[in-house]
Every structure is written in C-alpha cells, then in structure tokens.
C-alpha cells in the first residue's frame, strides 16, 4: 500500500499524522510525507519599493527549511509509533492543491491523507479548501482527518 500524507505543520495536519501513526497497515506500506510551500521570489520578480531579490531568496529559503522541518517532525512521529512503515519525504514548491495531486500520481498513491482546517462554507469558498480540492480531483482514495 502507498499512502501520501500531506502536512503543513498545523494542528489539523498533526491530527492526520497521528492518525497514520496509530494505525496498523500491511507490511511494506510506504508513506510519502509531503509539505508544500509557496516561493516568494517567483511572485515578486520586480523590486518593489527597493526590496532586493536577495530578500525574497531568503524568504524562500526559510519557507523551504520550515517545510523540511515539518516533514522531519512527521517522520519522527511515524517512526516512533509505527516503525514498520517505510517513510520518505518531499518538500515541494507550488500550490498545495495541485502539488499534492501531482505528487500522489507520481508516487502512485493508493490513498491520500490530509487534515481538514474545518472552515465554514463561506470561508471554504473564499479561501479554497485544499482537502476539498484534493478529494474532488484525486485519482485515488482520499481521507480527510478532522481534529
């Protein structure tokens, strides 16, 4: 079995990590932990108000490092509670909705697990729910874990 576990480090994502950690899975189950961040340097290619490209590059580096730390924390939890899982990680730059879906296909996931932030209908409409988009467009099963 192949599971793609998407996390952003929020308490909602931590609930999803703990859900995976506390379950029994078949031998040789592979879990790919994904964290997605958005690069600033691509958004701000001009130098508005004298802000340098180095400034945006530092923001990008810090965002990447934060996402990397999020995946490392998830690995520690999974390995401590469920050492039989084969765990890998990936940090991706992009839109969470499309990056999770693309990585699930690349990985060959049988199941995608994401946490739900629990936005109401209006907030979900305005902000765009990652879990809803993944559930609607995934080519495999999706589990949305609520806190």
Image (cartoon, rainbow, N blue to C red):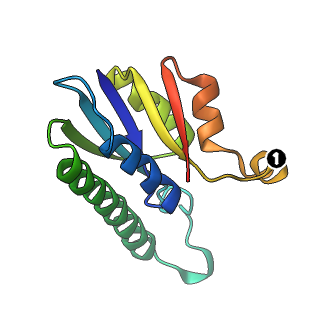
Q: Position of residue 48 (x, y in %)?
A: 61, 75
In the image, residue 38 above or below residue 121: below
Horizontal side of 129 relative to 71 (left or right) equals right
Is residue 42 among what the camera can see?
yes
Q: Position of residue 78 (x, y in %)?
A: 25, 48
In the image, residue 28 above or below residue 120: above
Q: Quadrant of the C terminus?
A: bottom right
Q: Which residue is mark 1?
A: 121
Q: What residue sits 34% from the left and 20% below the top?
A: 108
Q: Position of residue 32 (x, y in %)?
A: 29, 37
Q: Nearer the viewer, residue 128 or 21?
A: 21
Horizontal side of 76 relative to 55 (left or right) equals left
Q: What residue sits 40% from the left and 65% below the top?
A: 63
Q: Residue furthest right?
A: 122
Q: Quadrant of the N terminus?
A: top left
Q: Nearer the viewer, residue 55 or 95?
A: 95
Q: What residue sits 60% from the left and 24% below the top?
A: 137
Q: What residue sits 59% from the left and 40% below the top?
A: 131
Horizontal side of 142 relative to 103 (left or right) equals right
Q: Residue furthest bottom?
A: 50
Element type where label 1 sits in the image: helix
Crowding around mark 1 (Cα neighbors within 10 Å: few <14, some 14 to 19, many 20+) is few
Is residue 92 among what the camera can see?
no
């Amino acid at each position: 079995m192949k599971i793609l576990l998407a996390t952003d480090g929020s308490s909602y994502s931590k609930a999803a990590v703990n859900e995976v950690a506390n379950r029994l899975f078949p031998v040789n189950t592979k879990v790919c932990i994904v964290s997605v961040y958005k690069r600033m340097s691509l958004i701000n290619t001009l130098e508005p108000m004298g802000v340098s490209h180095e400034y945006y590059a530092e923001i990008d580096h810090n965002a990447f490092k934060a996402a990397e730390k999020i995946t490392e924390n998830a690995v520690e939890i999974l390995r401590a509670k469920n050492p039989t899982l084969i765990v890998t990680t990936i940090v991706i730059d992009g839109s969470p909705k499309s990056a999770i879906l693309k990585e699930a296909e690349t990985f060959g996931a049988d199941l995608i697990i994401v946490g739900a932030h629990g936005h109401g209908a209006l907030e979900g409409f305005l902000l765009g729910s990652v879990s809803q988009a993944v559930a609607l467009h995934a080519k495999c099963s999706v589990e949305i874990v609520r806190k």
